[in-house]
Amino acid sequence: MGLTMEQAAGRVMVALDYPNAEAAERLLQELNGIPCYMKVGMQLYFAAGPAFVQGLKERGYHVFLDLKMHDIPNTVKGGANSITKLGVDMFNVHAAGGKAMMEAAMEGVEAALAGAAGAKRPTVIAVTQLTSTSQAVLNEEIGIAGPIDQAVLRYARLAREAGLQGVVASPQEVQAIKEACGQSFQTVTPGIRPAGADIGDQSRIMTPSQAIQAGTDFMVIGRPITAAPSPRAALETIIEEMMSV
Ligand SMILES: O=c1ccn([C@@H]2O[C@H](COP(=O)(O)O)[C@@H](O)[C@H]2O)c(=O)[nH]1
């Protein structure tokens, strides 16, 4: 059976890629009542800070804080500790930081939870290969040999071994990740483009219905919604496409 409206909306993470809180707030008002996740990335976080994130949580939004931490283990542990205290539902690190760094992130979460009774446990996921990275860029610029899906799978296995709950990857890699890491290992997939939409700087893409068919847990969508003449209509069309699968 297909997804209900609530189920489909709950699997969309809207990327609030805006320069300030006021611009993000306008989108929140426009999408009011549609029960999707909100993703706060670097642009908005560096401008509006933790107060904006905490405000979203106080208003009942599900929040993915997409800061892609990548540093030495001790620093990432501290970062994960601070992020957990913000009460977000999900945050991420770069798998390229290695297993010790990802384990340190989990230690930071545990330390935060131990110090705050009733604090919410966030889902911690790892970025594998950015969805803007093509096969050619991976091999020729970055210098990692082999097929990109193998590089993604290597990072996904490492993230699972480190105790993380999922990864950021392209929807093109979801089936292989689920086979390698288990069905409950979460896949969060940017690189979503409705048919005919501008691809922009993305490389490894799928349409919303293709991503649902591939089994993605959450699809991250920014410009196809935020740059549309009517963001609400664009999101509703995406949700309808997801429900039609
Ligand atoms: O591999 C990755 C990791 C994160 N992103 C983020 O997702 C959104 C995508 O926005 P679009 O406008 O739909 O392209 C954006 O916030 C990225 O920082 C990603 O695209 N790929």
Image (cartoon, grey):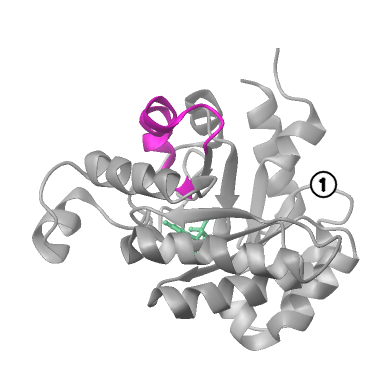
Q: 96 or 168: nearer the eye?
A: 96
Q: Quadrant of the N terminus?
A: top right
Q: Please state if 24 lies on the left or on the right of 221 as rendered.
A: right
Residue 67 vertical placement versus 102 (above, below): below
Which residue corresponds to the image point at 45% horizontal and 49% vertical from the top-left?
Answer: 191
Q: Residues within 10 Å of mark 1 (few under 14, many from 20)?
A: some
Q: Callout 1: helix, strand or loop?
A: loop
On the question of residue 22 being in view, the answer is no
Quickly name the residue at label 1.
35
The residue stretch that appears in magenta: 167-185
Residue 160, image quadrant: top left
Q: Nearer the viewer, residue 80 or 130?
A: 80
- Residue 194, given in percent of the width and then of the height, sits at 52, 41
Apparent side of residue 172 relative to residue 229 in the rendered image (left or right): left
Residue 76 lies, in percent from the top left, at 48, 74
The x, y position of residue 182, in whole percent, is: 47, 28
On whether residue 8 falls in the magenta region, the answer is: no
- Compared to residue 98, the image places residue 76 above or below, namely below
Quarter holding the C terminus is top right
Q: Is residue 51 left or right of residue 189?
A: right
Query: Would residue 73 appear left or right of 154 to someone viewing this image?
Result: right
Q: Give the percent coordinates (x, y) of residue 186.
A: 54, 39
Indicate the amino acid at tag 1: Pro
Residue at the image position 56 percent from the left and 31 percent from the top: 184
Task: Find residue 116 and report its image quarter.
Answer: bottom right
Number of labelled discs? Answer: 1
